[in-house]
């Protein structure tokens, strides 16, 4: 599903010396695989995740997503790809304070463009929240939900447009142990359905749930 060929990422700020965040990364991830990306702060994890999620472009190298080279795609093409094929789950949930759980999950449908899902957004959002165990929290605002419940809303939102790839950045980082296990169980279910799941984590127990671990050190990939 994903192939990175000699991908580098270099940042240049003002007159400062360029910083090479990623160095000649070669990585292949199969459809339906769960992969954990690990490494110390500053190792390149965020840079790699941003490229995988089409939020940033490599400085050099090729990124093949489902067989298509997206490294040179236009901003409009990348936006369409993110909206239709990629679901994002963040450590800090990124829920909007003034809308309900049901409305949060509906949001990605607004960016889906002309591609119509056979089920209306409201019905699909309700079904997804029911799936993650929040059927009785549809009208609740983020401030009325626990951390685990907020993250489950985020999981449901990530699934709204039926993505083939799920990117999870420290998905259990702000959760207690029990809530973290619930979220990881949901991610395991998504992998079993054939979705590809890539997660960044510092947690050994979370990383062990993946089929494979990728270790980054100073922008270099050491283990795959």
Image (spheres, grey):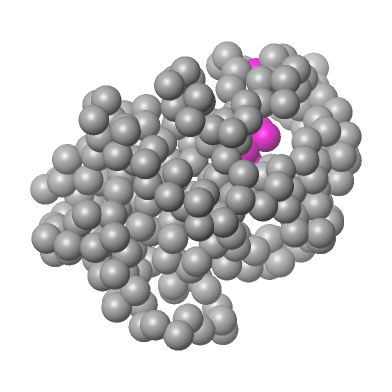
Residue drawn 50% across the image and 51% down it = 192
User: For residue 197, which quarter of the picture?
Assistant: top right
User: For residue 80, which quarter of the picture?
Assistant: bottom right
Residue drawn 19% across the image and 56% down it = 134
Check the image and report above or below for 23 versus 111: above
As for residue 192 lying within the magenta part, the answer is: no
> In this rendering, would 9 be left or right of 167?
right
As for residue 49 lying within the magenta part, the answer is: yes
Instruction: Label the magenta part by its dominant secondary structure.
Output: helix
Check the image and report above or below for 107 versus 172: below
> In this rendering, would 22 be left or right of 162?
right
Tell me where residue 176 appears, x and y as whole percent. 24, 26
* Region rendered in magenta: 43-50
Tell me where residue 88 appears, x and y as whole percent. 49, 50
156 vs 56, nearest the viewer: 156
73 vs 181, nearest the viewer: 181
Residue drawn 30% across the image and 48% down it = 152
Residue drawn 51% across the image and 25% down it = 207
Check the image and report above or below for 80 versus 1: below
Tell me where residue 174 appears, x and y as whole percent. 31, 29
Q: Is residue 52 visible?
A: yes
> In this rendering, would 85 be left or right of 224?
left
Q: Is residue 16 visible?
A: no
Tell me where residue 179 appears, x and y as whole percent. 25, 34
């Amino acid at each position: 599903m994903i192939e990175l060929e000699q991908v580098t990422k270099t940042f240049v700020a003002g007159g400062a010396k360029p910083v090479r965040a990623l160095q000649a990364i070669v990585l292949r991830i199969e459809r339906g695989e769960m992969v954990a990306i690990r490494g110390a702060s500053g190792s390149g994890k965020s840079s790699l995740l941003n490229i995988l999620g089409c939020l940033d472009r490599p400085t050099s190298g090729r990124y093949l997503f489902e067989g298509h080279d997206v490294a040179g795609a236009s901003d409009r093409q990348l936006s369409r790809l993110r909206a239709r094929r990629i679901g994002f789950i963040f450590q800090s949930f990124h829920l909007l304070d003034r809308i309900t759980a049901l409305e949060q999950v509906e949001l990605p449908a607004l960016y889906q463009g002309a591609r119509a899902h056979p089920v209306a957004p409201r019905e699909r959002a309700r079904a997804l929240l029911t799936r993650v165990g929040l059927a009785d929290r549809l009208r609740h605002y983020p401030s009325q939900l626990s951390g685990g419940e907020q993250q489950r809303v985020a999981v449901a939102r990530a699934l709204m447009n039926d993505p083939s790839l799920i990117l999870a950045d420290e998905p259990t980082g702000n959760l207690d142990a029990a809530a973290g296990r619930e979220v990881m169980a949901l991610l395991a279910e998504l992998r079993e359905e054939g979705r590809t799941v890539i997660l960044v984590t510092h947690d050994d127990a979370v990383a062990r749930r993946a089929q494979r671990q990728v270790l980054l050190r100073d922008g270099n990939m050491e283990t795959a």
